[in-house]
Image (cartoon, coloured by chain):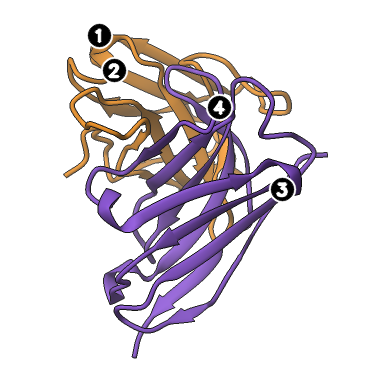
């Protein structure tokens, strides 16, 4: 059974750094052609892929947010961490992590339930 | 704003067939990249509906089908049911967006009348 779960603060202040952890089970990020992505969704708005880390530690970032994002993985602990610096109220959103599978491009077949992060002073 | 354009909303009556389009360009769908589709019921995480343009994951009813032609893709839902009321998103890749491997469309809200 494959599961993913996001964890982190529900409230952050403007200019602070957000750190989110995706803890997963049922698969390994050391398996070829597997990845984990972070996708966010502001209230009432569309999905936006923030970052994707692959089994070989290759990383991809949203061009518009690249300077603020870092994605890392700990294969032994089955977790992926996303950090986003200089948070702003416009970053208020539900943040999802999801397992990616090989495709052109990768697709996300299992998703976490999401965690709502509010940016406010 | 979105490199993949979807209609904001579509509607249909139970039993009818609806299609949702995902229009791209020569740097994404037209370049041969796959299109994937997701269904998001209110208050829940997205669910993979179609991958690789036409493939359904196990458990997805065959009422849902995907197609791709040129610079566009479509999701068709046959025999519409009330539980199909949700937001639908297409996803692909755009080679003009350096560094990013994944782009989503703006989403389409399906209303079952």
Single out the mark in the foreground, 3 or 2: 3
Q: Which mark is residue A56?
A: 4
The color chain A is rendered in: purple
Looking at the image, which residue is at 58% across and 43% down?
A: A98
Q: Which residue is mark 1?
A: B70
Single out the mark in the foreground, 3 or 1: 3
Q: Which residue is mark 2?
A: B29
> For numbered disc 3, what is the local secondary structure?
strand
How many discs mark residues in the rendered view? 4
Left or right position of A95 against A4: left
Q: Which residue is mark 3?
A: A24
Chain coloured orange in the rendered structure: B
Q: Position of residue A91 (x, y in %)?
A: 33, 67
Q: State the CA–CA distance, disc 3 to disc 1.
A: 37 Å
Is the residue marked by circle 2 packed among few (<14), some (14-19), or many (20+) residues within 10 Å?
Answer: many
> For numbered disc 4, what is the local secondary structure?
loop
Q: Position of residue A68 (x, y in %)?
A: 30, 58
Residue situated furthest right in the rendering:
A1
Q: Nearer the viewer, residue B113 or B96?
A: B96
> For numbered disc 2, what is the local secondary structure?
helix
Q: State the CA–CA distance, disc 3 to disc 2.
A: 31 Å
- Subunit of label 4: A
Residue situated furthest bottom in the rendering:
A121
Looking at the image, which residue is at 31% across and 44% down?
A: A62
Relative height, residue B79 to residue A104 (above, below): below
- Subunit of label 3: A
Is the residue marked by circle 3 packed among few (<14), some (14-19), or many (20+) residues within 10 Å?
Answer: many
Q: Are marks 2 and 1 on the same chain?
A: yes
Left or right position of A107 against A50: right
Q: State the CA–CA distance, disc 2 to disc 1.
A: 7 Å
Q: Are marks 2 and 4 on the same chain?
A: no
Q: Quadrant of the N terminus of chain B?
A: top left
């Amino acid at each position: 059974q494959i599961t993913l779960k996001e964890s982190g603060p529900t409230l952050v202040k403007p200019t602070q750094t957000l750190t989110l952890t995706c803890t997963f089970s049922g698969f390994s990020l050391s398996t070829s052609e597997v990845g984990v992505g972070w996708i966010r969704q502001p209230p009432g708005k569309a999905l936006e892929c923030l970052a994707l880390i692959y089994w070989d530690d290759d990383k991809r970032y949203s061009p518009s947010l690249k300077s603020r994002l870092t994605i890392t993985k700990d294969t032994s602990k089955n977790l992926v961490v996303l950090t986003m610096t200089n948070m702003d109220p416009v970053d208020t959103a539900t943040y999802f992590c999801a397992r990616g599978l090989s495709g052109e491009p990768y697709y996300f077949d299992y998703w976490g339930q999401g965690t709502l992060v509010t940016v406010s002073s | 704003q979105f490199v993949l354009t979807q209609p904001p909303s579509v509607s249909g009556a139970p039993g009818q067939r609806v299609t949702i389009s995902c229009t791209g360009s020569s740097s994404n769908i037209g370049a041969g990249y796959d299109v994937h589709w997701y269904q998001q019921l209110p208050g829940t995480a997205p669910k993979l509906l179609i991958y690789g343009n036409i493939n359904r994951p196990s458990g997805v009813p065959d009422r849902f089908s995907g197609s791709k032609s040129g610079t566009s893709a479509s999701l068709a839902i046959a025999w519409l049911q009330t539980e199909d009321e949700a937001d639908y998103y297409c996803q692909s890749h755009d080679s003009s967006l350096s560094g990013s491997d994944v782009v989503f469309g703006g989403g389409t809200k399906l209303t079952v009348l």
